[in-house]
Amino acid sequence: MLNNVGRPTQPMETDDNMVTVETFTGNHGLALETPLIFEQGVPGRVGVDMEEPAPVKSRLGNLARKGEIGLPDLSEPQVLRHFVRLSRQNYAIDAGFYPLGSCTMKHNPRINEKVARFSGLGDLHPLQPASTVQGALELIDSLAHWLKTITGMPAVAMSPAAGAHGELCGVMAIRAAHEAKGETRLRILVPESAHGTNPATAALCGYKVDAVPARKDGRMDLEAFAAKLGPDVAGVMLTNPNTCGLFETEVKQIADMIHEVGGYFYCDGANLNAILGRVRPGDLGVDAMHINLHKTFSTPHGGGGPGAGPVVLSEALAPFAPLPYVVQGEAGFELLETRHGLAKDSFGRMKGFHGQMGMFIRALAYMQSHGADGLRQIAEDAVLNANYVRVGLNDMLNSPFDGICMHEALFDDSTLKGTGVTTLDIAKAMIDEGYHPMTMYFPLVVHGAMLIEPTESESRETLDQFIGAMRHLLERAKSGDVAYFQGAPHFAPRRRLDETGAARNPVLRYSPSTEEEKGTAAS
Amino acid sequence: MRYMPHTANERKEMLAKIGVGSVDDLFTDIPEEARLDGLLDLPLHQSEMAVEKNFRTLAAKNLSPGDVPSFLGAGAYQHHIPSVADHLIQRSEFLTSYTPYQPEISQGTLQALFEFQTQVALITGMEVANASMYDGATSCAEAVLMACRVTRRKKALLSGNLHPHYRDVTSTTLQYTEFETATLPARATDVEDFTSLIGPDIACVVVQNPDFFGRLQDFSALAEKCHEAGALLVVVVNEVISLGAVKSPGEMGADIVAGEGQSIGVPLSFGGPHVGLLATRQKFVRQMPGRLCGQTVDQNGKRGFVLTLSTREQHIRREKATSNICTNAGLCSLAFTIHMSLLGETGFTELAALNHSKAATLADRLEKIDGVEILNDSFFNEFTVKLPTEAATVVEKLAARRILGGVPVSRLIPEQPELANLLLVAATETCTETDMNAFAAALREVL
C-alpha cells in the first residue's frame, strides 16, 4: 500500500545545524555513490562472453537493425560493483524493522529462494508436454489444496499475478455469474477505507463504485450499507480484517445482506495474516478472496514485485474461474487451457501461461515449514505484536478506534496538533532512527494516519526499542524541535527529494543532453 | 518454529502487558460460531531439511529443459542467465525491500528502475517506458486500454498472428469495459488485411514482431495507415532479444510497445513470474498505466529518484485511475537491468546475432528431412515447421526420447484444425551442435 497519498515532499529550508563534510569523491566512508550505468562504460567492453556465431545467410528479411542502440559497454566487475553499491542505498526487512501497515513485511526464509531455483522447477518451460511436468502440476495442485483448506473455500483460481490482479479475477467472476443468470447489475459497494485497487478494479469491470462510510468504531456502517442495497448491486468489496486493523464484527450479517439481494461478497485478503488458522473466510460467507502470496506467505516483495494473487472462490463463482485449470486425469495431472468441459463457463484468461510458479514454489515451502500449527501461531504472534505496540504507545498517540486491534495498530495525528510537526515528519525522523516508516496517511478515513504492522517475525526487544524510539520522537516533537523534523532524514543516502518538481517536469529516462543541461551528472 | 522469536514465557508477559488473560482474548471480534478451536487439517511444521527434500522429490518428477535438447519458445525462451544477475537479485537489500515509497531509503531500487526504463526505451526505439507490468500478455491488454484512452475510441483490432495468450488476455481484460476487440484469423498477412478495416472508430491496431509464427514484418506502412486514420499502432515483442538484430518498433512508427522481457535475466519458471515491458511516446505519458520512476534532486541538490506522476494511479485516483495495477514485476525488472548492463551494446547485438545464427543453422538442418517444410520467409530465433503429421503427437514421441522438440501450434490455437501439423521451433544461444543433431535424428525417427 502507498503511504504518502497526496503528500509529495518538497525540500524545505531548515536550520538544523547538520554539518556536511565534503569529500573529493562524493562518497562518505561506506556510503558509496554510483553514477547511472549510462554514465559508465567504454565501447567494446563486455560483461558476457559467448561463442562466435556460425556464419549463416541472414533470414531477417530486410529488417536488420541499422544504427546504434545506445547501451553502455561494461565489464562484469563494474556491473557487479554498480549494483552492490545501489543495493546499499536500500532499506530492507533483512536489515531492520519495517512496520509498513497493510504490507506485511515479514521474514523471508532463504530455503524458499533455494528450492525455487532447483533444476526441474525454476527452469521449466510453460509449454512442455504435460507428461514432462507432472511434479510442477502436482505442486500447483498441492498449493491449491493448502489455500482452500486455510480459507475453507471449495475452489481456487491460481493464475492472477498480484493482489490487484486477483481482485480483477474475483470481480470478473462476479460479473460473469450475474451475466450467466441474465442479470445486469451496475453498482459495487466499497467501504471508504478500502485500498485504492478496489474501486479501480470495480471500474475496470464496468461497475459504478458506491462508497460506504465507516462507523465511529472503524467498521463499515451497516445502516448506510443496508440503505445502498438493491437489485442493481452486484456485490460488496470488503477488506477483512479491514484497513484500520480491525475485524469486521458483523461480517456474517454483511454476507447475508448482500446475498439476500442476489449480490456476491468479495473479500480483499490483503490482511489474511491476522486470521490464519483462527477463522476461515469460507465460514463467513465470502464468495471470492484474493491471497497475496507475497504478503501472507512471504514470497518476498522484491522492491515492488513480483507477487501472486490466487483467488479462492465459492461454489457459486467457481464455474467462472479463469483459465487454465490444473485437473487430475487418467494419465496424471493435466492443464485445461481452453473453454471446454469443466472450464466451459470460464470468463477467460488473465495472464500468459499458468500463473506465478516462482511464487507458488516459495509459498508452498513457507506453508510446509509452518504447518497447521505454525500458521495459527503466525496469526497469534502478529496480533500479539500489534497490540503490544498499541499499548506501548497509546498514552502518547491517539487510537481513533478503541479496543483490541488485529495485526496492525492505527493512530491518528491529533497528538501532533499545534507542534508544527506532521505525520510525514515523524516518518522521516524514523528513518534517522534506523526504521522504515510505518504506512502514513492511509486509511484515508483517519486524519494523519499512522498504520503500524509489526508482523510475527519481530522479537520483543525489537518492539521495545521501537516503542522507545517513537516515544522519544513524540516527546521531541512536543518540545518544539520542529526544525529537526522538517530536516529529516539527515542520515539517509538522500535528504528529502523534490517530488513536486519530479512530477511537474518528468524526466523518466537518461539522456546525455539532459544531464549536461542540469549539471547533475555524478563526477 | 524457527521463524518466530517469542518464547511461551514472553508471550505470557506480553499478554499481561496488553491486559488480557490469553491469546484467545485478542480474537474475540471474530463471530464466536466461526472461530476455529483446533488446527486446520494440514500437516504440522517441518524442518528446513524436510522441506528441501519435498521439493527435490517434486523436481525429480519433471524433465528440465536444461538437461535435454530443448527447442521450446512460443512466448517464453530459454537463455543463459549470468551468475552475477541471480546473485545480485538475492541481495537482501533488493530482495526484501518493499515498493520504493520512501525514496530517501530506496535509491537503490529507484535508480535501477530508472536504468530499466531507459534500457527498455532504447531497445524498443521509444521515448519512455514504465517500471514494468506483470508480463507481456497483461502489458498488451494495458497497451490497448491506454490506446483507447488516448484516442477516445472504443475498438481495437488484433492481428491473428498475435500470441494467442496475448489476444485472450486482452479480450478478457476488455470484456466488461466500454471497449471491444476484433481479431483477424491466424496466418493472415497483417499489413494488407488490416488496411481496409482501419476506420474512424478504431483506437489501435495490435501486431507482433516477430509474430507468433516467427515471421518478421516491417510495420512502417501500417503505422502510416493507422496515423492517417487517427489510430495508434501497438507493437508486441515477446522475444526481446530480437531487438538486438531487428529494426525497432520505434523506427517503424509504433506508438506503444508491449513486450515480454523474460529473455533477459529472468528464468522460465514454468511461465511466471516474467516481466512485462511497456514503452511509448513522451506525449502519452500521462495515460500510461503502472509505476514510473523519475529523476529529481534532494534538499542538498544531489541527484535522486522518486516514483512520479502517481496521480495516474489507483492509490490516488481510485476508480478514475489509468489501471488497477499496484504490485508489478520489480525484482524481475532488476534482473533484466543487470543482465542488460552486462551485455551492453556489444553483448546485446552479439547475443542477437548468435540466436539468429543458431536458428538459421537449425532451419537448414531440419529442412533436409523428408516431409519437413519451413514455412517462414523470415525469422529471428524461432520458425514454423510444417510436418506430415500432427505436431502434438510428434512432440510427445520426441519427449519420450528426452527431447523437447518445440511447441505444437494446436496447443495454443486448437480452434483452427488446419494448423494441427504446424510446430514452432526455437533455437537460442543455449542450443549446441549436439542438441541440433539429436533433434534432427529423433525427428527422422518419429516421422
Image (spheres, coloured by chain):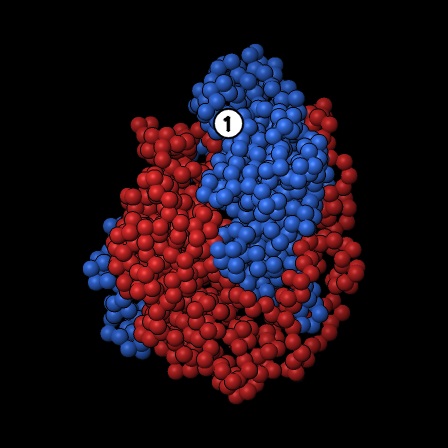
Chain colours: A red, B blue
> Where B317 sits versus B236, above or below?
below
- Marks counted in the figure total 1
Tell me, yes or no, if residue A51 can be seen here.
no
> Where A192 sits versus A313, above or below?
below
Image location (x, y in percent) of residue A121: 45, 40
Q: Could you tell me the amino acid type at mark 1?
A: Val
Q: Quadrant of residue A195?
A: bottom left
For the residue pair B176 and A285, the one nearer the viewer reads as B176
> Where B5 sits versus A197, above or below?
below
Q: Residue furthest bottom?
A: A479
Q: Going 42% across and 74% down the picture, which residue do you hit?
A: A411
Q: Going 61% across and 16% down the picture, which residue do you hit?
A: B367
Image location (x, y in percent) of residue B396: 44, 23
Which chain is disc 1 placed on? B
Q: Going 63% across and 71% down the picture, which residue do you hit?
A: A10
Tell me, yes or no, if residue B375 can be seen here.
yes
Q: Counting other residues with Cα less than 10 Å from the Cα at mark 1, is it few (<14), some (14-19), or many (20 or more)? A: many
Locate residue A295 relative to residue A428 in the image: left or right. left
Q: Going 68% across and 33% down the picture, which residue do you hit?
A: B225
Quarter of the picture holding the C terminus of chain A: bottom right
Image location (x, y in percent) of residue B154: 55, 41
Image location (x, y in percent) of residue B311: 57, 60
Write down the residue under mark 1. Answer: B407
Judged from the image, the secondary structure of the residue bearing numbered disc 1 is strand
Q: Quadrant of residue A102?
A: bottom left
For the residue pair B255 and A455, the one nearer the viewer reads as B255
